[in-house]
Image (cartoon, grey):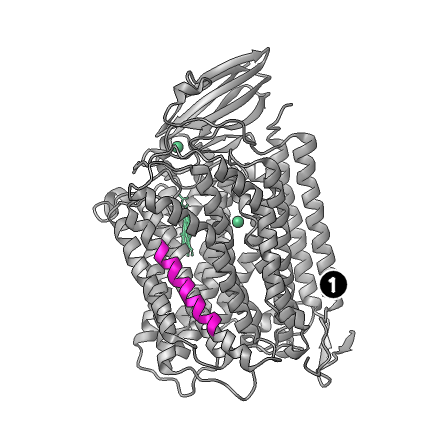
Amino acid sequence: MSKEQLPDNGNETFEHPKGAAVILAIFLLLIIILWGSVYLIMLSRGVTFYG
Amino acid sequence: MTANVYQLTAKEKRFIGWHFIVAVAALSIGSLFGPFQAMEHAGWDFYEKFLNPLFHSYYEGLTLHGVLNALIWTTFFITGFITFLVIYGLKRPLRYPKLNQLGFWLMVIGLVIAAVPILLNQASVLYTFYPPMKASPAFYIGVTLVVVGSWIEGYGFYLTYYQWRKENLRTRTPLITFMGLITMVMWQIATLGAAAELLVDLIPWSLGLRAGLDPQLDRTYFWWTGHPLVYFWLLPAYISWYTFLPRQAGGKLFSDSLARFSFWLFLLLSVPVGFHHQYVDPGVPSGWKMVHSLLTYSVFFPSMLTAFTVVASLENAGRARGGKGLLGWLAKLPWNDPSVAAQLLAGILFFFGGIGGLVNASYNINLVVHNTSWVPGHFHLTVSTGVTLTFMGILYWMVPYLTGKELWCKKCAVVQVWLWFIGMTIFSNAMHVVGLLGAPRRTPLGQAPYIPEEWAGHLLRVGIGGVILLISVYLFVAVMIGSVLTKKKLSTEVEPPVAESLLDPQTTPSWLDRWVPWLVGAAILLIIAYGPQLVYQISTAQFTSPGFRVW
Amino acid sequence: MANKHESMHIDPYEKTWIIVSLAMLIVFFGAITVAGLSFGVRVPDPVARVNPNDLAASGTFAEPGLKEVAPKRYEAYIVAQTWSFTPREIEVPAGSIVKFYVTSKDVQHGFKLQNTNVNMQIVPGQVSSLSVKFDEPGEYDFICTEYCGLGHAAMYGKVIVTP
Ligand code: HEM
Ligand SMILES: [Cu+2]
Ligand SMILES: [Cu+2]
């Protein structure tokens, strides 16, 4: 568990937001999956421009 | 944010309270139609049977729903909330309270002038009022007055801030005031588009002073305002998540300077992105659509910053309450406080709203979702939940603060919040799915002849979600009315839960507290993103469209 | 300046988050650019202006309908009005490429061809255009996706793709 002293609040110890990092990692994964699946739907529906 | 707490006078509290009364009244009427629309989709049509003599059509109801919820509930709530942020943050009264009162009453008058033609079925043009559908001039004039009234309230805030600044040269602007002011400044830049559309085009045209309009040009004006409009709704919710929620949950704001930085990015990037609503418009070149797509991707970034800071602040709170392990702190948050529960649940659904937004913003992917029910599915997670449920949460502490009386039936409030969350999850998921299958929005699907069998299950879920939300809306209204009427006085006054920052805000870099460079930056970006197309569209405009009344 | 030390403190976790989320946005933007420029999933570009009050004078929309421009290549001129499309039905053989040109006589409409990427805002005075290749025989509805008045929900047409 890494603790860091912050410059101006000398009397407070501070922990890195590990839990937040986990939640945001899950969020990122969800973005990639959900966005990616709509992207694939788009590709499956074909082209709109023929030169 | 220490000992010296400025107490708002009874008069100031009443002034802010009136904003909220109008806002909640608008929501209570506007949100009546949402569930009816949802149930119509499921095949339970109440329009012909019950609503008909009073409300003339699905579309009149949908106009009321969009205008009262998206324009009136939000604008009145937000101007009231910023009034609080300015007075309480700067610890001083408004410089010219009469000016703010003038702004407020103009908004009320505008609302009445716009509401009458809608209720008479003279303005069933939906809240985007795209020409060449032509509403009664009163509708356009009323909407204009609401916007102008909000501007005037904004001038009142600026003048108050200016006076404070002169007396406090070296102090960082208090975070809540800073954020409230950015929201208002952004709004005033944003509404220039609608102002041009209404004043130059729609009002003269509806009065018969202009024969025709160019509907493509008016779409461009409209979406100059239309996208930042959603940030006008969203930023006050972010303000609450950044600066109130951490304190309500028992912690501190994780980063004052990143909070400020992200708000400057919102000021810069909220407006020059409007073409992302016009990806499938015929009159805008695809290259410019691409430019706005890139800028929209950029404005996604400060929201990612917000997500981190807010979740980290909540973790700080949960750990301060004894939460252990990676995620154990989540359960330690005060879920039994309706204000906290509302904001947490709003935040969760807003995550998904954000993902949908990124899909919409993605240029050609928009072809899959444009004008399908995916889009209302999306923004009922953002404005109708992320924002609306957060505003409800704010009112759950703000109303006792303003009245000095207890929140009536706190348990009802907790239930209300969960019902909203559950109802919206069901409703919105179904709307997204059926939209991907091709269902159009703004359409009473129960009457449409082209609906395939396989949509039925999803449309049923839309209706079920709607019924749950119907209960939730009126439970909310009941708690609000109950809290105003109750006789139970609070023994100690509510202290507004403004969170301290983990770091002293005086250490925030001073470039994060200077207006001019950021305003100049915003102007330059606007000129780059909009200048060439505006010049082109105006100089090649063909004012050939007369008005139509098609409802 | 205040005598305190100024800094923009960024937690290392937050720094990682910033980098990762920026990287994701860049990759996504790359993916849509490739889909647009290389694959050809494009959004409409301006093609022409017309006078909505006098479409007959515009030439191309005087007689809406299907025109064969080469073997298995068609142009479809469609007029939207409250509350129908003209023509309401068109028929092409499987394997055809059809370029749609759609305009409106009155208010705004929408044109979404189901199960394809053709989805356009129809604005009076403008012509909206996208193409599609019909590989599979069957019926493809095109529906109006913009509110255009009381009859909006019933406004649609069909492309019949014959084997
Ligand atoms: C009470 C729960 C609600 C339900 C069940 C609901 C339901 C719906 C439905 C089904 C539609 C789509 C109608 C259509 O496209 O034909 C819709 C549209 C809309 N809703 Fe809601 N809604 C609710 C609350 C809200 C709230 C709180 C807001 C905003 C603060 C809101 C803003 C909107 C807007 C802006 C539209 C688009 C109107 C248009 O297309 O012109 N809704 N709503
Ligand atoms: Cu937008
Ligand atoms: Cu139509």
Residue named by callout 1: C15
- Judge by depth and name the residue closer to the eye, B389 or B281: B281
Residue B25's spot in the image, x, y percent?
32, 63
Q: Is residue C30 visible?
A: yes
Residue shown at the point (59%, 67%) measured from the top left: B515
Residue B157 forms part of the magenta stretch: yes
Q: Which residues are magenta?
A: B144-159
| Image quadrant where residue B384 sits | bottom left
Seen in the picture, residue B184 relative to C5 is either above or below; the reply is above
Residue B377 forms part of the magenta stretch: no
Mark 1 is surrounded, within 10 Å at the Cα level, by few (under 14), some (14 to 19) or many (20 or more) other residues, namely: few
Give the left or right position of residue B243, taking residue C3 as reference.
Answer: left
Give the left or right position of residue B121, taking residue B459 as reference.
Answer: left
Dominant secondary structure of the magenta stretch? helix
Give the left or right position of residue B191, taking residue A12 as reference.
Answer: left
| Image quadrant where residue B500 sits | bottom right
